């Protein structure tokens, strides 16, 4: 009898349409969230996961409407609690490809606590934080990333609250993958989603996102084509930090302090510039800290891509070890123990 | 008298807080009450009030805990999901016996629910809400005027009894505009001594510690008994309700807040049709007007409870009526507001039904 070798059925190749739900997208016209959704839908089909293994989890806010629009299983949870909910999902079924979609309000105010603890555990979960520096859903109050002096409905005299730098917070929380991108650079946004996907462990991706109704133009100097080249430096592993319309400027580190130098006027050359290394936690911190200096270009890209065992992998290993070491014991024998006696 | 103004319920409440001498407001945006935070952010600081948007409702209630402990008039406001987050803090504040004001502009639940008006938080508001044996004094406004008036009354009650006071409104009362008159109110005249406050060890004061921990069971029971005695005093002294056409009523409606306004209209419609309907509107939900309902139950043919929930206050009404007459319930949920005609239909059914039939309907 001839042996029949069965060729596994070719998995249907996923397309953008597979990730578009039938829900009407209810963000304000012109919102930066549309671009993020479009890039996620464009990139998700490339990944080596079955569609049924994708999960989208969110809390409360404009960003948190994401699970309705992405045609995968989802969980629209509680304000700020998405990282905790996602932890439960991932630990219940480690095969799932878990993505958290959150914002600066949801993720960094009430959710700050859950976020930092999920990140430090290094659960294999991707967290995408849409930063628009405002509360959009409740119509325009300041958020934990709103800038000092920002006038909002709850800060008519200007905000006194010192803001978080999300990538710095993530690095401080021992996150193994930290990156930043923007809604108006679709190619880079797509690339950052790919990089987050490739990372094993907690991947934190901040996206500068324009809220054109309550905080229009918050990031325009970084996101608009005419000003971007002079105000943004793209981080690429192993490459020097060069920027500017004419690629004529670069970042040099003087001690621990980054500074802008010209590589066009003969004073400095490319070899003087800082070379990015994604695996260097100290460098990541210096680069993230550039965010607070308005005289420096804003770094975009992967700040850190470190390797550390994930919590879910460690847990699985620990459970397997405990099981292997456990003798096949009879419960009754345990209860009876070695010394038993009968009271007459 | 004060000046007459046209205001949104949330804004009237916020303005009243400033006039009542509230020194600290701590809140977090949530629909349908963000106007309280926004109004106070704009008008509070120039008039001597600290206004802070916290990182969460959990933080808000704990900031209130601190400010109240330091002896200041302090308040927070939120809507249902945010009030759920405050329950831990409220339990501690009630145990530590600190005066403060909490405002719940109720929306439909459970969960994230809707942003439309609801009365689904009655149980949470009146039965404790957090862990342990404690009560909040709960005032239920049914107009923009009362949204404002109850702030003054609420702060005075909180100070008098060293107990948190909750104003339980709903999304419609927060958002609607009506005329409101602010009473002449001088916070200085209402200021009372707070010999328990942690307001600084000046003038050789003895050390004060605010706590809710009483690890010895005897001490804890002592505190429980003292709290119960206080709640009983509140039950004796602070019951508030309004009667509308109740004196000769055959059918008595019991409804609070927005439902009471609808029920009031339904009573008028019923009277036009020759049905003697009346209304008892509980204003204080804790303490509940048990005695007043019990007394009226002796004289009416039936009682109808109208609520925007699945039937919560009806349990307290049944306890008050003690089976003297049938008690029916009618309500809508999910943020849907019942219409006076819907309520009228139930009144007409009750009016036409023989006594026994009405009784059966209650317990099916």
Image (cartoon, rainbow, N blue to C red):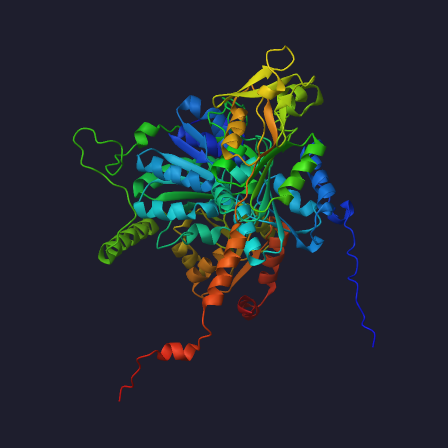
- Residue lying furthest front in this view? A271
Residue A205 rendering spot, x and y as whole percentages: 60, 38
- Please give the name of the residue rendered at 63% of the width and 17% of the height, measured from the top-left corner: A249
Residue B134 rendering spot, x and y as whole percentages: 35, 52
Residue A317 rendering spot, x and y as whole percentages: 51, 58
Is residue A173 something one can see in this rendering?
yes
Is residue B299 something one can see in this rendering?
no
Residue B59 is left or right of residue A20, and the answer is: left
Residue A175 is left or right of residue A50, and the answer is: left
State which quarter of the image contains the C terminus of chain A: bottom left
Q: Nearer the viewer, residue B231 or B355?
A: B231
- Please give the name of the residue rendered at 57% of the width and 53% of the height, measured from the top-left corner: A90
- Seen in the picture, residue B26 relative to B340 is either above or below; the reply is above
Residue A197 is left or right of residue B12, and the answer is: right
- Residue lying furthest right in this view? A2
Q: Nearer the viewer, residue A234 or A277?
A: A277
State which quarter of the image contains the N terminus of chain A: bottom right
Residue B185 rendering spot, x and y as whole percentages: 37, 29
- Please give the name of the residue rendered at 40% of the width and 50% of the height, measured from the top-left corner: B286
- Seen in the picture, residue A274 relative to A62 is either above or below; the reply is above
How many numbered badges does the structure rendering display?
0
Residue A242 is left or right of residue B95, and the answer is: right
- Please give the name of the residue rendered at 81% of the width and 70% of the height, measured from the top-left corner: A4
- Seen in the picture, residue B218 relative to A182 is either above or below; the reply is below
Q: Nearer the viewer, residue B200 or A115?
A: A115
């Amino acid at each position: 009898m001839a042996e029949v070798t069965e060729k596994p059925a070719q998995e249907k190749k996923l397309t953008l349409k597979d990730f578009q739900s039938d829900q009407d997208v209810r963000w304000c016209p012109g919102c930066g969230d549309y671009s993020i959704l479009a890039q996620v839908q464009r990139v998700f089909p490339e990944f080596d996961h079955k569609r049924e293994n994708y999960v989208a989890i969110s809390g409360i806010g404009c960003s948190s409407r994401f699970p309705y629009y992405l045609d995968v299983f989802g969980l629209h949870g509680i304000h700020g609690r998405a990282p905790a909910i996602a932890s439960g999902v991932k630990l219940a079924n480690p095969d799932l490809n878990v993505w958290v979609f959150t914002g600066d309000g949801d993720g960094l105010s009430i959710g700050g606590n859950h976020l930092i603890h999920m990140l430090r555990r290094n659960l294999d979960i991707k967290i995408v934080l849409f930063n628009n520096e405002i509360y959009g859903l409740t119509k325009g109050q300041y958020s934990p990333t709103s800038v000092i002096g920002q006038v909002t409905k709850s800060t008519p005299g200007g905000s006194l609250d010192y803001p978080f730098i999300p990538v710095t917070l993530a690095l401080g929380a021992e996150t193994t993958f930290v990156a930043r991108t923007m809604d108006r650079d679709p190619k880079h946004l797509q690339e950052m989603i790919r990089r987050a996907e490739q990372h094993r462990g907690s991947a934190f991706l901040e996206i500068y996102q324009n809220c054109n109704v309550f905080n229009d133009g918050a990031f325009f100097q970084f996101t608009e084509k005419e000003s971007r080249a002079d105000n943004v430096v793209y981080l690429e592993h192993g490459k020097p930090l060069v920027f500017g319309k004419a690629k004529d400027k670069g970042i040099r580190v003087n001690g621990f302090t980054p500074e802008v130098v010209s590589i066009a006027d003969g004073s400095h050359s490319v070899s003087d510039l800082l070379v990015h290394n994604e695996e260097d936690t100290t460098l990541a911190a210096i680069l993230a800290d550039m965010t607070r200096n308005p005289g420096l270009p804003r770094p975009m890209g992967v700040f850190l891509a470190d390797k550390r065992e994930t919590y879910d992998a460690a847990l699985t290993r620990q459970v397997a070890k405990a099981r292997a070491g456990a003798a096949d014991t009879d419960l009754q024998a345990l209860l009876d123990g070695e010394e038993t006696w009968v009271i007459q | 008298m004060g000046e007459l103004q046209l205001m949104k319920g949330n804004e009237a409440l916020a303005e009243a807080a400033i006039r009542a001498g509230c020194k600290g407001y701590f809140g977090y945006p949530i629909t349908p009450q963000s106007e309280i935070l926004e109004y106070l952010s704009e008008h509070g600081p120039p008039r001597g009030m600290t206004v802070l948007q916290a990182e969460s409702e959990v933080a808000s209630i704990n900031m209130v805990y601190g400010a109240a402990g330091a002896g200041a008039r302090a308040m927070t406001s939120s809507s249902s999901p945010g009030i759920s987050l405050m329950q831990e803090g409220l339990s501690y504040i009630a145990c530590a016996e600190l005066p403060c004001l909490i405002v719940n502009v109720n929306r439909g639940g459970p969960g994230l629910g809707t942003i439309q008006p609801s009365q689904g938080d009655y149980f949470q508001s009146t039965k404790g809400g957090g862990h342990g044996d404690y009560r909040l004094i709960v005032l239920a406004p049914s107009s923009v005027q009362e949204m404002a008036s109850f702030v003054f009354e609420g702060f005075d009650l909180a100070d008098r009894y060293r107990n948190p006071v909750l104003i339980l409104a709903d999304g419609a009362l927060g958002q609607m505009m009506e005329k409101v008159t602010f009473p002449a109110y001088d916070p200085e005249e209402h200021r009372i001594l707070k010999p328990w406050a942690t307001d600084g060890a000046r003038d050789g004061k003895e050390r004060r510690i605010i706590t809710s921990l009483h690890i010895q069971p005897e001490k804890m029971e002592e505190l429980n008994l003292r709290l119960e005695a206080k709640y009983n005093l509140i039950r004796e002294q602070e019951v508030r309700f309004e009667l509308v056409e109740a004196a000769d009523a055959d059918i008595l409606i019991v409804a609070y807040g927005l439902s009471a306004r609808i029920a009031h209209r339904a009573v008028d419609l019923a009277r036009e049709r020759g049905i003697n309907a009346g209304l008892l509107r509980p204003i204080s939900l804790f303490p509940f007007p048990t005695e007043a309902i019990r007394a009226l139950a002796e004289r009416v043919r039936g009682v109808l409870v109208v609520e925007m929930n699945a039937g919560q206050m009806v349990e307290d009404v049944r306890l008050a009526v003690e089976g003297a007459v049938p008690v029916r319930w009618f309500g809508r949920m999910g943020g849907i507001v019942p219409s006076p005609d819907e309520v009228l239909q139930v009144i007409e059914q009750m009016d036409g039904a023989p006594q026994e039939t009405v009784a059966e309907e209650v317990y099916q």
